[in-house]
Image (cartoon, rainbow, N blue to C red):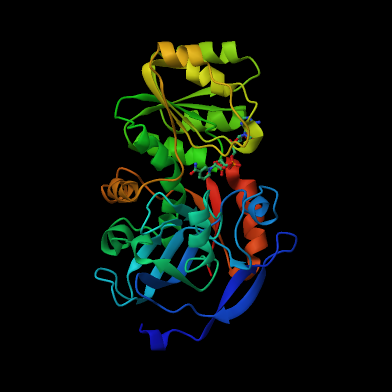
């Protein structure tokens, strides 16, 4: 589709204030410029806590008005004059982690968060403000990853809603790759029962690891452990010493991946997990904690533990995850996915929150 064939206007979910619900509006369709693609959005992810992001509860900052949304799957409708790979018609993964071209350390989350620096705020306020809960989105060329349709759709039989899972899987993969999780290793995933935690379990297994799933919900943990012989389960209780003994009963633990929400900041599992690591064990912290965390520094020092924080993932991580999927090592089917039109965004947000502890999710299909 050329610039002339793009519709003059399109429908989008626009947030004007965190004290008011977003509204569907008809606005001018974005136009391609150098370095960009205009993508017809086919499916967009819903983060389990989306409502709290856009009603201000989470204190996320972003410019307003804003077409909200996040990563997704789309079909390229038009490209800027400097595109050398992408062409109209290509099915792509839309990566929501947008980085500065002249400073790759500057980044923000498309449609969700303006990032942590003055530079990232500049990046979100200008060219790349409007995201994917819309019929069309303008996306940096490098944030559009072509999907091998012949393989994924025709050979593996994946539907769009299956491919949509890439959006969520990318997040924990960033942390797991960052601590170089290896086949045969044992890793604790905590909490393992939320949206990203469940996906971390799935990827860790695909990377060849054995998983100790930790969480408060005994029933959800039991179901996880039943689903695969390589998953063990340990419940988080108030008794960190008892939890530590339970973790140690599985032998040496190589790694620990944490994706705790803000509500978990005083949980005892941080201590039991860190203390359970073997010498030179690695920990990846990806949770959304706001306050400070107390760490058992004596064990960290005496056992050469490596603690790493990770925000999202690298471009190389996206390519590596695609390979795991294309090799069939990471399967995308098996989840229950409910689709919601733009007009039904609120129902979608509610269901995504409700389904966070289950093997299902909700997506927007604009
Ligand atoms: N670093 C990054 O790049 C990145 C990217 C995306 C998201 N995140 C962070 O990831 C976090 C998790 O997201 P999500 O979508 O997986 O959330 P979610 O679906 O709401 O899951 C939250 C998990 O935390 C557990 N939990 C809640 N309160 C707890 C407490 N007090 N103590 C221990 N466990 C508790 C829940 O289990 P129960 O069943 O026990 O309640 C559930 O397993 C978010 O808060 C976000 O900030 C980070």
State left or right for residue 22 relative to residue 103: right
Kindly tell me whether residue 347 is visible in this rendering.
yes
Residue drawn at the location 62% of the way across and 51% of the way down: 60
State left or right for residue 152 relative to residue 294: left
Q: Quadrant of residue 177?
A: top left
Image quadrant for the N terminus?
bottom left
Residue 104 lies, in percent from the top left, at: 37, 52
Q: Is residue 306 above or below residue 140?
A: above
Residue 32 lies, in percent from the top left, at: 40, 77
Residue drawn at the location 28% of the way across and 51% of the way down: 326
Residue 79 lies, in percent from the top left, at: 34, 75
- Residue most extreme to the front: 118
Residue 56 lies, in percent from the top left, at: 69, 53
> How many circles with numbers are drawn on the protein?
0
- Residue most extreme to the bottom: 4
State left or right for residue 17 relative to residue 160: right
Q: Quadrant of ligand 1?
A: top right
């Amino acid at each position: 589709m050329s610039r002339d064939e793009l519709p003059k206007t399109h429908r989008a979910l626009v947030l004007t204030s965190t004290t008011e619900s977003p509204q569907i509006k008809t606005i001018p369709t974005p136009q391609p410029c150098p370095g960009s693609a205009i993508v017809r959005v086919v499916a967009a992810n819903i983060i389990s806590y989306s409502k709290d992001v856009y009603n201000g509860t989470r204190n996320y900052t972003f410019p307003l008005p804003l077409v909200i949304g996040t990563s997704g799957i789309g079909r390229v409708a038009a490209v800027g004059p400097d595109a050398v790979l992408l062409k109209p018609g290509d099915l792509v993964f839309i990566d929501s982690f947008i980085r500065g071209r002249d400073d790759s350390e500057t980044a923000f989350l498309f449609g969700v968060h303006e990032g942590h620096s003055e530079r990232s705020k500049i990046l979100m306020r200008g060219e790349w403000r409007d995201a994917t809960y819309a019929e069309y989105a303008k996306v940096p060329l490098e944030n559009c990853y072509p999907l091998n349709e012949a393989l994924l759709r025709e050979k593996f039989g994946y539907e769009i809603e299956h491919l949509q899972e890439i959006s969520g899987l990318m997040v924990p993969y960033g942390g797991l790759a960052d601590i170089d999780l290896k086949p045969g290793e044992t890793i604790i995933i905590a909490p393992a029962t939320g949206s990203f935690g469940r996906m971390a379990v799935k990827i860790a297994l695909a990377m060849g690891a054995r998983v100790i799933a930790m969480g408060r919900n005994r029933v959800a943990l039991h179901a996880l452990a039943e689903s695969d012989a390589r998953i063990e389960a340990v419940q988080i209780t108030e008794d960190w010493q008892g939890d530590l003994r339970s973790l140690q009963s599985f032998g040496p633990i190589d790694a620990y991946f944490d994706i705790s929400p803000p509500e978990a900041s005083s949980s005892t599992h941080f201590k039991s997990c860190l203390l359970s690591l073997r010498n030179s064990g690695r920990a990846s912290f990806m949770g959304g904690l706001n306050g400070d965390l107390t760490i058992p520094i004596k064990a960290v020092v005496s056992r050469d533990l490596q603690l790493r924080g990770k925000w999202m993932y690298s471009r190389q991580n996206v390519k590596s995850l695609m390979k795991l999927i294309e090799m069939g090592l990471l399967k995308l089917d098996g989840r229950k996915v409910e689709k919601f039109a733009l007009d039904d965004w609120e129902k979608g947000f509610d269901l995504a929150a409700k389904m966070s502890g289950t093997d299902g999710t909700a997506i927007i299909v604009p």
